[in-house]
Image (cartoon, helix red, strand yellow):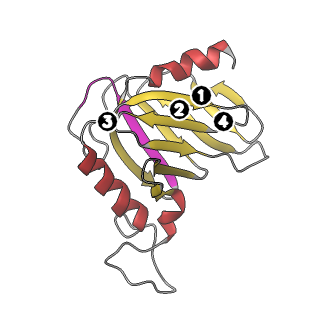
Amino acid sequence: MNSEIENYLNQLQGKYLSSIGRAANIIWLNFVDIAVETESTGKDILPGSLCLHVQCPCRMIDKENRIIIFASSDIYVPNSSIEWCENFEWDIQGNNLFDEKSMHWLLSKGKVCINNYKFNIFGDLKLTLSNGNIFEVLINSSSSDECWRLFEKNSDKDHFVVTGQKAIFEYE
């Protein structure tokens, strides 16, 4: 792995997961230096927070129990209190299974930090958390479209952007 990429990704080690959410079908996770009370709205983002925005398949797994806790495709499935219908409005916050399961997981796990990460030649990212769960990002594109990005919130530093073809540093 390129040393510039490794140095950038090394910032993840030891960061605490403070919030999970989504905007339309883009999933975001926020990481902070100190454990803070979780808030579903993401209002707890502090300066220096790292934000991961995912636009490709991802999932939280419990490897020990061999289960997928929640995954990106859950966005298109009604939550447990809504009956499926043809006109299901997945984009309304709280309506879908991803919103329900990710929030339940976050609130039930308390203060969880990143123990380590793995980044492979295809751009897949694997975050091993202190509670043993694993968050995986899986590249499913061969195009130059963005798959995921990692950046420091409220900073003018470059964003680390991964596409189906390469990993680059850029600033929006």
Residue tagged 3: 112
Residue 46 shown in magenta: no
Q: Nearer the viewer, mark 4 or mark 3?
A: 3
Residue 51 at x, y = what percent? 45, 34
Circle 1 sits in a helix, a strand or a loop, which is it?
A: strand
Residue tagged 4: 162
Are discs 3 and 2 less than 8 Å apart at CB? no
The residue shown at (32%, 43%) is: 42
Residue 138 at x, y = what percent? 63, 46
Residue 74, disc: none
Using the image as rendered, state which of residue 169 and residue 135 is in the foreground: 135
**Res. 45 image quadrant:** top left
The residue shown at (30%, 28%) is: 46
Of helix, strand and loop, which mostly describes the magenta segment? strand
The residue shown at (51%, 19%) is: 10
| Residue 73 seen in the figure | yes
Residue tagged 1: 160
Q: How many marks?
A: 4
Mark sitting earlier along the chain (3/1): 3
Q: Residues within 10 Å of mark 1 (few under 14, many from 20)?
A: some
Using the image as rendered, state which of residue 62 and residue 99 is in the foreground: 62
Q: Which residues are magenta?
A: 26-35
Residue tagged 2: 150
